[in-house]
Image (cartoon, coloured by chain):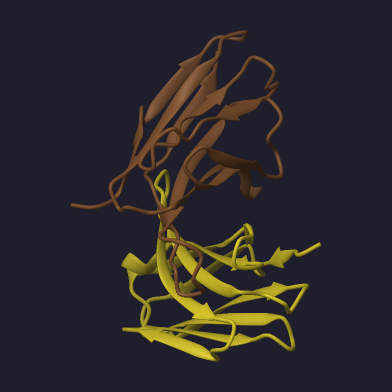
């Protein structure tokens, strides 16, 4: 059974620092992996999607990497800002017609 | 603007009542999903639908029911059989089944049982 784990559950860093959020999954046979952002009481917003054949994707200050063989993905945030404070979730899709499994998220707090 | 709408934003239910949560999308997406989010639990899949008039149970379907009579609509009914329905409910959709298809989410409905 596919399990998705995100450690740590919470993280506080000073503004301006670069940081890395981690996501691990137990079964390397994934279709794709997505990183989402969730603000309190809101829905999820997709940040980056990495196909199983890709190694990384970039959008602005965000870079997501994927290493299927080790079952790991990282989300790198450069030059963090207070507006980056949110919960970040990763999710793996198991197959073309299959469901999506979510991690429990990392709650990020950027200190001004 | 294209997107997913959920209504109501807040919903209160008395024990023993059925309630229906609305989810509508104008993205012309084929697949739609319902998730439940509890504090510290992450998102858990309730039901999903890949096409009109077809849907599959997710991991926690007991006490819930859905319908997919129209492509743009995927309502969720929380029945009295659901023993602990207080949670944040999220509806989502994807265009189809390509590995590049991003999942889009609605703003959520917070259900509270009184």
Q: Residue furthest front?
A: B53
**Residue B46 image offset from top left, x and y in percent:** 62, 40
Q: Residue A33 appears in which quarter of the rendering?
A: bottom right
**Residue B21 image offset from top left, x and y in percent:** 45, 27
Q: Which chain is brown?
A: B
Residue drawn at the location 43% of the way across and 22% of the way down:
B11
Q: Nearer the viewer, residue B102 or A58?
A: B102
Q: Nearer the viewer, residue A71 or A78?
A: A71
| Quarter in which the C terminus of chain B is drawn | top right
**Residue A56 image offset from top left, x and y in percent:** 50, 89
Q: Residue B61 appears in which quarter of the rendering?
A: top right
Identify whether A22 is placed above or below A108.
below
Q: Residue furthest left?
A: B1
Identify the hue of chain A. Answer: yellow
Q: Residue furthest bottom?
A: A55
Residue A90 at least partly seen: yes
Q: Residue furthest right?
A: A1
Residue A78 at least partly seen: no
Q: Count the marks: how many?
A: 0
Identify whether A64 is placed above or below A102.
below
Residue drawn at the location 39% of the way across and 36% of the way down:
B70
Residue drawn at the location 52% of the way across and 23% of the way down:
B112
């Amino acid at each position: 059974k596919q399990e998705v784990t995100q450690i740590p559950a919470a993280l506080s860093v000073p503004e301006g620092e670069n940081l890395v959020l981690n996501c691990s999954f137990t079964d390397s046979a994934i279709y794709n992996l997505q990183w989402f952002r969730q603000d309190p009481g809101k829905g999820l917003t997709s940040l980056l999607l990495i196909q199983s054949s890709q190694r990384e994707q970039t959008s602005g200050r965000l870079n997501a990497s994927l290493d299927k063989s080790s079952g790991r993905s990282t989300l790198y945030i450069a030059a963090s800002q207070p507006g980056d404070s949110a919960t970040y979730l990763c999710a793996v899709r198991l197959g073309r017609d299959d469901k999506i499994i979510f991690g429990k998220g990392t709650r990020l707090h950027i200190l001004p | 603007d294209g997107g997913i709408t959920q209504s109501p934003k807040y919903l209160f239910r008395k024990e023993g009542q059925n309630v229906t949560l609305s989810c509508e999308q104008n993205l012309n997406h084929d697949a739609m999903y319902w998730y439940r989010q509890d504090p510290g639990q992450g998102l858990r899949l309730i039901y999903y639908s890949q096409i009109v008039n077809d849907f599959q149970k997710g991991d926690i379907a007991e006490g819930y029911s859905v319908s997919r009579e129209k492509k743009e609509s995927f309502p969720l009914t929380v029945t009295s059989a659901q023993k602990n329905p207080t949670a944040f409910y999220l509806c989502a959709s994807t265009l189809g089944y390509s590995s590049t298809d991003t999942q889009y989410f609605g703003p959520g409905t917070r259900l509270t049982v009184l």
